[in-house]
Amino acid sequence: MKKYLILAVVVIALVVIGGYFFLFGRKDVCKSVIPENAKAVMVLDAKQLASQLDINITDIIRFLQSDKNEKTGIDVLSPMYGFLSSEGYMCGVLPLSDADDLEDFLKEKKVEVESQRGFRWAYTAQMLLCFDDKKALALGPISQVESHNMRPRMVEWMEQGSSKSPLLPSVLDQDGALRLCSKMSVVPSSYMQQALQYLNNPFDMDKVFLNATLGVEDKALHLSTSIQSEEEEIQQLLSQHNSIFRPIQANRLKSSVSDPVVWVGFNANGDSLLVELRKNALVRMFLMGVNLCMDADMLIKSIDGDVSLELSAPSEYTLKAQVTKLDFLKNVSDWSTGFLHKSYSFKPVDKNNFVLQGDGKNTYFGVIDNQVYISTNQSVTKLSESNASDDFVTRYNSQIQGKLFYASVSINKLTRFREVQNMMSDDAKKFYYFLDKTDRLTVSAKDYLHYDIELTTKDNISDFIKLLLK
């Protein structure tokens, strides 16, 4: 009797362990499909995402099913992969719990399924789908004519036993529900033109990689990115810019309003900054125009410390910068003659503070406590520092201090301005419900290679997602 009891316990234990691995430890069958020459690789772990959001995985499964309780055959408990092929096609690799369910689902959607080369195939909405009993590979956008040429490649990817992609280890080594590794060459050259113009010998963008991970907290979506490369040209570029931008000190940096719509901060060396600004043709022309009115070059050279820009409304701003010398004020008495337009006048308020009047608006300029300012807000001329506990910089000091760059936008406030609403399309306005739930979007840089993007919300993100899943 005791022997049978022990045998029963062993059988139950094997069933429990087997059930656990069936539900929560299924083999990652999708990563082997990634081709060696993929330009970008992404992985989505829905189980980890559900855990971070504190959402029951069964709620997600029910959400993926229709009102008729149809089964899609997709295994949401296992990692899903995406990649950009060398031909430029966007591809997704999905694990399957039941291939027959997927075929039935497609047929109910009036999508024809055929068998060829040992796989099942379907074409719909410019997407070609290939699947076997364990995984499905989707590729697109592609025309039906072109899709026949890609079938041999897809079969090759589906049959390869393992992936030799150099991007895949970088993706797997990262921690996050959504992870990405991409060659920088996937970025259109038009977007890279401004950055590359500073290089005498542009480097091979296939040897520069972007890593990104998405994490979820109670009231924040956090995207961490980093640039990785062994190219000497990049190291030289970074060493050149080390003398321009430095970590923000934030010890004397105070905001003029308690909750600005936009706040941007960095720490700069003026001499080096001016050299870089002059390399841009448009900026160079702008500076030439400003220099007709004031000693803009000398003003920029005097900057040595924290710089901040605040927007309290689309046409209301305050720019502040720490300066070490006031040489740019030596010829201030001649500045008024530089404003050729008769409707403008430049008048002194006192020795170091001035006002530009024109078109019914006043712009204030001057120096207070070794900080130069340009502002549409007159209150900035009356207070050298704000000691209010609700000061923006004070509230976010731990996040701002030490960063190379920090920018924060109140999305909710920004979208309520009439000027912004007029610029938005009707489709964008449909997202007002979502925008109303957001707080701020923040972009910051730890150094030249690491960047963070964070979207904070008013309520817990899990509550918002659970509402969508109902």
Image: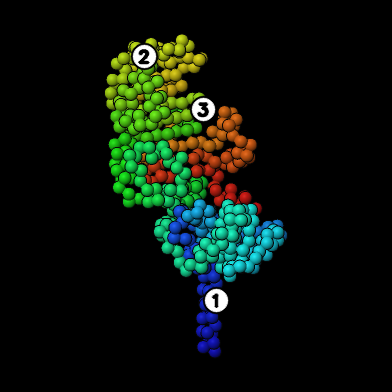
Q: Is residue 412 left or right of residue 384?
A: right
Contact flag, marks 2 and 1 (Cβ < 8 Å): no
Q: In the rendered structure, which disc, 3 or 1, sits on the residue that comes first in sequence?
A: 1
Q: In the rendered structure, which disc, 2 or 1, sits on the residue that comes first in sequence?
A: 1
Residue shown at 31% from the left, 20% from the top: 328
Q: Label 3, label 2: how many angstroms apart (C-alpha)?
A: 28 Å
Q: What residue is pinned by disc 2?
A: 335
Residue shown at 47% from the left, 60% from the top: 35
Q: What residue is pinned by disc 3?
A: 313
Say above or below: 218 vs 136.
Answer: above
In x, y percent, where is residue 27?
50, 68
Which image quadrant is residue 50 in? bottom right
Q: Label 2, label 1: how many angstroms apart (C-alpha)?
A: 86 Å
Q: Mark 1 Cα within 10 Å, few/some/many (few <14, many 20+)?
A: few
Amino acid type for the residue under numbered disc 3: Ala
Front position among marks 3 and 2: 2
Residue shown at 45% from the left, 66% from the top: 162
Decide which of 386, 284 is in the foreground and name it.
Answer: 284
Colour scheme of this structure image?
A: rainbow
Q: Mark 3 Cα within 10 Å, few/some/many (few <14, many 20+)?
A: some
Q: What residue is pinned by disc 1?
A: 15
Which image quadrant is residue 433 in? top right
